[in-house]
Image (cartoon, grey):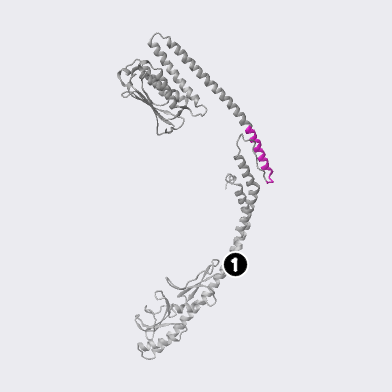
Amino acid sequence: MSAVGFARLSTGIKMLLILSVALLPLGLIATLASLQSARSNRQDRENEAGLIAAASARELTSAIGRGTGALRGALDTLNAAPFDAATCRRVFNVAARAQRWETHFALFDMEGRRICATSGFSQPPATAPTSESGVDARVIESARTIRFDIADEKSGFVGAGEFPEASIAEIVRPPVTAGSYGVVIRQGDADIAIAKAKRASRLTELVTGYGPVANGQLSLELTINATPIRAIEVLMVLLPILMWIFAAGIGWFVVDRLLVRPLTAMQKAISGFRVGEGQLAIPPMLTPSQELRGLGDAFTTVTKRLAEHDAELEQALARQTLLTREVHHRVKNNLQVVASLINLHARGAVSEDASAAYAAIQRRVDALSVVHRNHFAELEENRGVGLRALIGELAGNLRATASPSAANLPILLDIAPAFASQDVAIPIAFLVTEIVEMAMLCAPASAVTIRLHRTDQPLRATLTILAPGLANDACQAHAAAGRFNRVTEGLSRQLRAKLVREDASGSFEIEVSIAAPLKDD
């Protein structure tokens, strides 16, 4: 782990890592000692399993030898005089009864045809032995028996004997093993599982020993329970874990009581502190750490300075608000003075053209005054200029200052609530004024519809002004049409959007930026 990564860890984790590394050598020594003890115990138990397996293998080999001797005696008896199948069975029955364990005998010719057999002998035929000892031992997996065959060169017969599964279990039963054990007799891929070992407890394990049977023709595999793990061995294995847990507990206790808890209490006090609610109160800490006490005093001092600075900022903001109100008040008064002067000059005009010019100028001053007044009204909440109120007031002022021929011009509004900055509101006010005024000049009988609807983007809205009267030839050929086109194009550039015009329907559409998402009524 890099130094930077370690520095980012919490104090408790750092303490745990440091103590764990410090105690690691002791833990490794204890672990190696416990593993060595476990390996030694297992080796002893494996040796014990090997000895027991060898003893059971010798018992099975001895049983096969006795069975082979009985077979040779029976064959010698049959070779002494002519015999038939009944005599053969009688001789083999006598030999079988003389065995310590249940044993079955049979006689075959060299071609594998059975001549006679005692009761219970399995079906597979005997074959002439191929081993040097003259005795073939085989595992008959299908019949779960062990077969041993010998050949009589004089008579040309093959004698066969076999132990059933029950006899094998008695022969190989370990005399000194307590508890569960398992025995498997193997020959190549064939095997007979005589018994299956089970764990005596969760603390024991199974070990296996091997022993050769019949000069290695068969193999005996014995599985027994190893000696249970002793308490001292369990303690030795768990000692490293216990040491690490104990070390972690000590580290956690020390860090928690002397560092984490005081810091947590300090953090809660600091998080709950609000400027203007007085001085920061650090709860009493029962820690001997002078550094933490000094840190708490430092926070108290800093919050006191912040409170003083915040009070100064509030006073400065109050002064700034008063100055802003005074500026807006003076601007409003100046606009009213300009409007009054224009009105006085309009009354003294000697021609209709001059009166119309004064009226056009006054409408634009009124538009600027409406924007300023609405912006001043929303100044406290800092939301921007309300476009619904702005366009509604503009529409009222335009109808109020219209010429007698356009006094009844209908202006329909469909404005969704939205707010815009003053830089956007002023071009919108002038654009509405220019289009409505142009409709008043050349088509005073037609209606004007103003819409403001949302778009797919949350901070964009579409302003649509529909003046069907502007589509007639008289409006398009009007003397003020050129100036009207230049002004509207200039206002669209101020709004940083393209003004989409449809001369055939008298429609004007432009996208504008808003300061807050539109809301439905």
Type of amino acid at the residue the image marks with label 1? Arg
Q: Quadrant of residue 460?
A: top left
Q: Which residues are magenta?
A: 286-307
* Magenta-drawn stretch contains 166: no
Note whether 349 is above or below 1 in the view shown.
Answer: above
Residue 520 shown left or right of residue 280 in the figure: left
Q: Position of residue 339 (x, y in %)?
A: 46, 15
Residue 269 shown left or right of residue 84 in the figure: right
In this rendered view, identify the residue nearer to me: 424 or 259: 424
Q: Main secondary structure of the magenta part?
A: helix
In this rendered view, identify the residue nearer to me: 432 or 498: 432
Residue 500 can be seen, yes or no: no
Q: On the rendered image, what quadrant is the C terminus found in?
A: top left
In this rendered view, identify the residue nearer to me: 503 or 98: 503
Write the residue at 48% across / 15% down. 338
* Magenta-drawn stretch contains 298: yes
Which residue is disc 1 drawn over?
230
Q: Position of residue 218 (x, y in %)?
A: 45, 75
Q: Quadrant of residue 87?
A: bottom left
Classify mark 1: helix, strand or loop: loop
Q: Position of residue 279 (x, y in %)?
A: 65, 36
Write the residue at 48% across / 17% down. 336
In this rendered view, identify the residue nearer to me: 171 or 392: 392
Residue 29 can be seen, yes or no: yes
Crowd class of label 1 (few under 14; some 14 to 19; many from 20; radius 10 Å):
few
Note whether 214 is above or below 366 in the view shown.
Answer: below
> Outermost residue, bottom direction?
81
Numbered-mark total: 1
